[in-house]
Structures are given as C-alpha cells and as structure tokens.
C-alpha cells in the first residue's frame, strides 16, 4: 500500500508538462542529443518545421514557471526528466549539472508546498541508444533501469511519486510503426519488440525503485475506450484495443499477452524477445496507474479516405485491416472528439481490471485560442467547458467506485506539441513565442478557483 499517493477524501489536482516540450536549452550544461532533436531536424517531420531547442525556455525560467504552478493552488506538479541531461550518452557517465537542474525544480516545488510527481521517460531517448537499436533492442530496457536508479538515488529523498514511462504506445507505435514520432521508423515488427522492451524497462526500473524503498511507482498509459461504429467493425475494434490497451495491461495485470494480441504481434510470442522471467518482472510491478485520456476511439472499417484526429493513424495499428477512425463532433483542434463519458467508462473499467489506485495524469484540449478578453488574455471558455466536463466524469467514476486519486491537467504552458510543433495549444497559460511572456488564460483562473476550493475543503 502506497503511503505517498494523494489520499484525501476529495480528488486532488495538479498540472503537467514534459521536459522536451518546455525546457529548451537542448545543448546547455552537457545535455546530450535525444531522438527528438534528431527527428525534428529532419525536414517534413514537424508541421511548422520547429523543434524543442527553445520551447518555453523553462530551463531558464524555472522560478517563473514554478510560481505559475503555485498560483494554481494545486497540490501536485507532474514533470519529466530529460534522460540526455542526466546521462548524455544514455549509459555510464552522469552529468551533475543535469541533476542539479532537477534539484532546483524539486526543491522549488517543495518550497512552494507542491508535491513533485516525476516521470522518468517522456519520449526523449538519448540518441546514442537509438543508434544502438533503440527500444526494439533489449539493451535499452536495461539502460533505462540504470538511469532510473541514478535519478532515484539522487532525488528519492524528496520525490515520492514516480512514473516510469509516459505513454509507451506512442513511443512504440507512433515512433517505430507509423513513423509520426521520433525516431520516425516504419517497421511494425520493430514496434512490437519496442512495446515489450518498454514494459520490460518499466518493470526493471520499478524493481530498482522498490528495492530502494519507493512505494509509489507507476506507469502512465494512454488508454482509451474503443467503440465499434457497427457490428462489422467489432473485429477491428478488438484489434485496436489489443495494441492500444491490452498490450500494456496484459503483462502488468495478468503477466501475459493474450492470444488475439499475439496473432497481431507474433514478436510478443517470440522467446528471443520475451525471455523467461520477463513477464514476471512486469506483472504486478505498479503501485498506481496513470491514465492519460483525451478522446474515445470510434472504430470503423472501410476503404474510404482515412479520417481521424492527430495520432489516430491506422498505420500505428499494424495488422488491423481496413481500419478507419470516425470521431464525432464536437472535436478539438487536434480533431479529437470531446466525450467525457469515455473517461468515466475508462476509469471504471480500468479500476476494476487492475485493482490499482488511478491518477488521471493527463487530460486537456487544444483550441484555437482566438477569443480575447479586454485585457488581451485568452478567453478560452471552450477549454473550461472541456476541463469541467471531464472533471465531472472523474467524479462520477469515483462515485461508481473507481479509486481515482488525482486529476492532472495537460498542460501548464502552451508548448512544443511534438509533430504538431507550436501549432496546437493545450496550455492553461499562453506563452508568447517571440519573448516568452507567460499570460494565464481564463482556464488557468478557473482551474485555480477549483483547486483552491478543494484545498480549503481538505484543510477544514
Ligand atoms: C499526450 C502526450 C503529451 C501531450 C498530449 C497532448 O499524448 O503525453 O506530451 O503531447 O498528448
């Protein structure tokens, strides 16, 4: 039983960011190159031709950003650590200046009364590890466990809630099958091998952290309910569910990959890939589960031109024939259907399936942000409506018995949205790309009121 997860009577709140999306300073203080530096330098990979070299300059504006977190009145801040800042080549040598940045971040949070929730890997693999084969090779999982130990040895006295990976589905299937994310490979077999090694990496890292005394080690998954549009699409929906949800939950909860998944991904049945003992390492390795939710997946089959939102690429589901995604209106700027009922259903199902305490580690929306208040700030009523609707869905799931401890909004700042560059804004705070001025949006003030009211309720 974890003593360190939020456990008050009310839902706890937080805000999230990820290193590559906000930090910038990608060559400062000995940081090595990551796969996102390499990928975004390749023409045609990022819609606006941008990269994370400046991003929100949070590396240089740390105190300002921590003040923005504190101003929200939330109890938790979810951030990620950049592996190439800490081990520039992904193995061996440790860069003290990289660790020192995260010391300042963690100490700054604690000084402001905010609990750090650290994600060890949010997609920025050190480039030398990709050159050695990346996640499709086993060595990467082993290097990840070493890196996790280094970080935990350094920060474990102050950071109590840990997530190993963020959204391994994106790393494996957008990165190695669809080629839409770094490292941009299109090799389904490699993607399936990556999936196993990511979860193995999680399991090995979790063992190390547990041995070192941590009791709140989780993994963050982008799970979604998968809804067939019609009976003919049920097979395809089962396939999408396999690659999006069951490939992670199977080893974690049951210690196995199911047969329908193995039919799509024979690599997961290859004893050279899944070695004796691997599944035992992963089985039961999480003390809590992070759920990132944005939209349900409405699945159809057909031979029309593909529809669907950003990241809903059919090539990210290798072997699912004739797959189409059919988001229904209203959709966000990402083309993602707005449907809070999906979150409620997901949380109830995942709580029952896993028996684990859950945290909604990401939820939020990109909108055009083109409506301005008199003072020039963004009047993002659409985002407020989105957040409110989803927080209410979390409360309904809790009433239905799901043990959901916290709701973490994505994201504090408008930032580098991966393949979408700076064209999609999810922030509670607007960031001016010319001078880095931060201006809270209406959603920031709304979320602050909610978090503050909750804070008072816990105190009395
Ligand atoms: C998730 C990522 C996060 C952000 C949101 C919009 O897939 O974890 O970094 O890009 O989507």
Image (cartoon, rainbow, N blue to C red):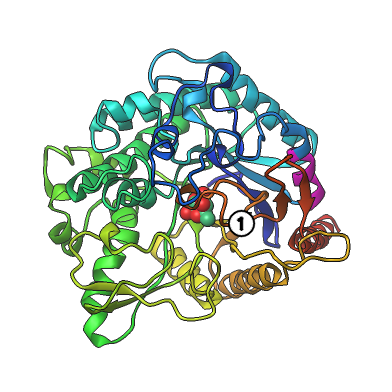
The residue sitting at 13% across, 60% down in the picture is: 263
| Total numbered labels | 1
Counting from the top left corner in percent of width and height, residue 155 is at 59, 26
Counting from the top left corner in percent of width and height, residue 299 is at 32, 76
Farthest residue to the bottom: give it.
230
Which one is in front, 89 or 272? 89
Counting from the top left corner in percent of width and height, residue 115 is at 69, 41
Q: Is residue 296 depicted above or below 69 in this figure?
A: below
Q: Is residue 281 visible?
A: no
In the rendered image, which quarter is residue 245 located in? bottom left
Which one is in front, 145 or 217? 145
State whether the magenta stretch is mostly helix, strand or loop: helix
Answer with left or right where residue 306 lies relative to residue 50: left
Q: Is residue 63 visible?
A: yes
Q: Is residue 179 depicted above or below 293 in this figure?
A: above
Q: Is residue 72 magenta?
A: yes
Answer with left or right where residue 143 lies relative to residue 97: left
* Element on which disc 1 rests: loop
The residue wearing badge 1 is: 425
Which quadrant would the C terminus be assigned to in this image?
A: bottom right
Counting from the top left corner in percent of width and height, residue 64 is at 78, 37
Where are the magenta residues, as a range? 65-73
The residue sitting at 25% across, 87% down in the picture is: 231
The residue sitting at 73% across, 48% down in the picture is: 75
Which one is in front, 404 or 125? 125
Q: Residues within 10 Å of mark 1 (few under 14, many from 20)?
A: many
């Amino acid at each position: 039983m974890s003593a360190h997860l939020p456990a008050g009577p009310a839902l706890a709140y937080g805000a999230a960011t990820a290193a590559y999306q906000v930090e910038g300073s990608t060559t400062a203080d000995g940081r090595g190159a990551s796969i996102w530096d390499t990928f975004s330098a390749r023409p045609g990979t990022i819609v606006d031709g941008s990269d994370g070299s400046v991003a929100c300059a949070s590396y240089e504006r740390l105190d300002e950003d921590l003040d923005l977190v504190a101003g929200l009145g939330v109890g938790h801040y979810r951030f990620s650590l950049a592996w190439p800042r800490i081990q520039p080549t992904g193995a061996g040598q440790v860069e003290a200046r990289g660790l020192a940045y995260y010391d300042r971040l963690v100490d700054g949070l604690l000084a402001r009364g905010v609990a750090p929730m650290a994600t060890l890997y949010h997609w920025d693999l050190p480039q030398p590890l990709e050159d050695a084969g990346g996640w499709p090779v086993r060595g990467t999982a082993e290097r990840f466990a070493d890196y996790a130990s280094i970080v935990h040895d350094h920060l474990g006295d102050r950071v109590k809630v840990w997530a190993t990976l963020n959204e391994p589905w994106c790393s494996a299937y957008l990165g190695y099958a669809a080629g839409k994310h770094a490292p941009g490979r299109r090799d389904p077999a490699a993607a399936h091998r990556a999936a196993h090694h990511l979860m193995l990496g999680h399991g090995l890292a979790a063992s190390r952290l547990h041995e070192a005394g941590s009791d709140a080690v989780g993994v963050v998954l982008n799970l979604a309910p998968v809804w067939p549009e019609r009976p003919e699409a049920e097979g395809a929906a089962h396939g999408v569910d396999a690659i999006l949800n069951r490939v992670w939950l199977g080893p974690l909860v049951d210690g196995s990959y199911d047969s329908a998944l193995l039919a799509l991904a024979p690599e997961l049945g290859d004893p050279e890939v899944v070695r004796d003992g691997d599944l035992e390492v992963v089985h039961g390795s999480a003390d809590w589960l992070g759920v990132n939710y944005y939209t349900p997946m409405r699945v159809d089959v057909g031979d029309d031109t593909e529809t669907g939102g950003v990241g809903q690429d059919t090539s990210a589901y290798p072997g699912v024939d004739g797959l189409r995604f059919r988001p229904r209106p209203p959709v966000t700027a990402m083309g993602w259907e707005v449907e809070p009922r999906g979150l409620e259903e997901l949380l109830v199902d995942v709580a029952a399936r896993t028996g684990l305490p859950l945290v909604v580690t990401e939820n939020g929306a990109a909108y055009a942000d083109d409506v301005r208040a008199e003072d020039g700030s963004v009047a993002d009523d659409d985002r407020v409506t989105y957040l409110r609707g989803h927080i209410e869905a979390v409360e309904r799931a809790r009433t239905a018995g799901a043990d959901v401890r916290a709701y973490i909004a994505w994201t504090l700042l408008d930032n580098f949205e991966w393949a979408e560059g700076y064209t999609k804004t999810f922030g509670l705070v607007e960031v001016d790309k010319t001078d880095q001025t931060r201006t809270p949006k209406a959603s920031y003030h709304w979320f602050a009121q909610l978090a503050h009211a909750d804070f008072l309720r816990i105190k009395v």
